[in-house]
Image (cartoon, rainbow, N blue to C red):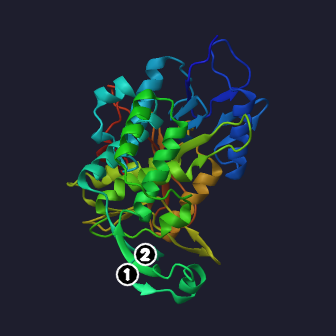
Amino acid sequence: MKRPPLLRVFEYEALTTSDPGDGRFLTKVELDKLYEYNDRNNNIFFTGIRNGVKFKSYVGVIQIGGLTIEILPKTDRQIDPEKDEYIKWQKALLDMLNFCHYIKVDSVSEAALEKRHNSILDLYFQLFLNEVSFLLRKGLIKQYRKNSGNLNVVKGRILFNEQIRKNLIHQERMYTEHQVYDNENLYNQILLRALTILSRITSNPNIRDQIHRIKLDFPEIQEIQINKAHFDRLKDNRKTKSYQNALKIAGMIILNYSPDVRSGGEDMLALLFDMNKLWEEYIYRMLQIDTESDYEVSFQNHDNFWENKTIRPDLVLINKVSKKIFVIDTKWKIVDANNPSDDDLKQMFAYNIYWDSGKSILLYPGSDILKEEFGNFHKGRPEGNQCKVGFINVLNIEGKLDRGIGKRILEKLF
């Protein structure tokens, strides 16, 4: 069977070089590229298996040559190959990324997404092109920079050593260093580099056409190789504020791009997100939007634990009236009801002691109908030391990301 250009899988699914009959397979070149990429990143994204890979809890999209692999989250062990199931979780992932400000999805209508974009990667490309088009219409920023060269008039200061070396015969010229005010700056060079990468890797004809038209309107500036150090040099100010969205996506494109310089190789771009961190931040934001809540919620807390090691619960809640403290630690994994791992329980025991919390919750994605009750730690706090294994549905009855889970989580504190 001919292989489609887009393969969708759920986390913890596998892809191999063997075709199971539905076209869902990898070529040897693609598999080698995945192995190479995983090795460079301490093997955090997937596990190597015989003639294939098994994905972990990182979700997002990988493009290798003409193949796009979309890795989607899943909150049960049942693997449903139906297309509708993949689409449902793709939309849920996009909604979660949007809500946590990883991507500004609301700038593209759902109708446009359905019509023109096959994958999350195409959506990122489209959002980037929209931002660059907006900046071009507004006018790209200009900055002063130093420029040196031969001029027929004296402008700036004369560089005498260069003047003697280069203009001994042509004394009518002056080799000077002077200031120029133009578009040749790092902000615009980053945008140009991202456009060049997109033109090389995208196979979407609509996106290729837009890149071509944008480059025609782009000023003539020098294209340079960009790395993380260049992004670290960027400074936010009034003039560059409108660049923030474009630079954010450009950074994801440039820093996750792996060109293949070998003959016959495939370029690769990967945009992957740790579902554990995304789940943690999503729950925090869900709790934050409940303006009528009696709780103050703090995120990414930490305290000294042992020597130079720290202890870091995900969420600490303080009741504004009673001042009681509760700890919630989010876990993006599937567990059986009331059967957490020993490591998770030991972690919660330490959180209770350090934050003087009588109750804590291990919060997993799952069905709200699962039985939940606080269990007792036998030591630690004479006045009570408890932990509950809690479950919360990610999707509502319509199959969309549930925006009302904040209140239901707070109800689990009692």
Left or right of residue 370, residue 98 in this image? left
Left or right of residue 384, residue 325 in this image? left
Residue sitting at 31 percent across and 70 percent down? 237
Q: Are marks 2 and 1 in contact (CB under 8 Å)?
A: yes
Q: Quadrant of the N terminus?
A: top right
Which residue in the protein does label 1 denote? Answer: 155
Instruction: Using the image as rendered, state which of residue 146 and residue 315 is in the foreground.
Output: 146
User: Disc 2 residue type?
Assistant: Leu
Q: Is residue 354 visible?
A: yes
The picture places residue 173, in percent across and down from the top left corner, at 46, 78
Q: Is residue 277 visible?
A: no
User: Disc 1 residue type?
Assistant: Lys
The picture places residue 73, in percent across and down from the top left corner, at 50, 35
Left or right of residue 52, residue 221 in this image? left
Q: CA distance from mark 2 to mark 1?
A: 8 Å
- Single out the residue that lies furthest toward the right: 50
The label number, if any, that marks residue 147 in the structure image:
none
The label number, if any, that marks residue 151 in the structure image:
2
The picture places residue 210, in percent across and down from the top left corner, at 38, 36
The picture places residue 74, in percent across and down from the top left corner, at 51, 32
- Single out the residue that lies furthest toward the left: 292
- Single out the residue that lies furthest toward the bottom: 160
Left or right of residue 312, residue 393 in this image? left
Residue sitting at 35 percent across and 23 percent down? 115
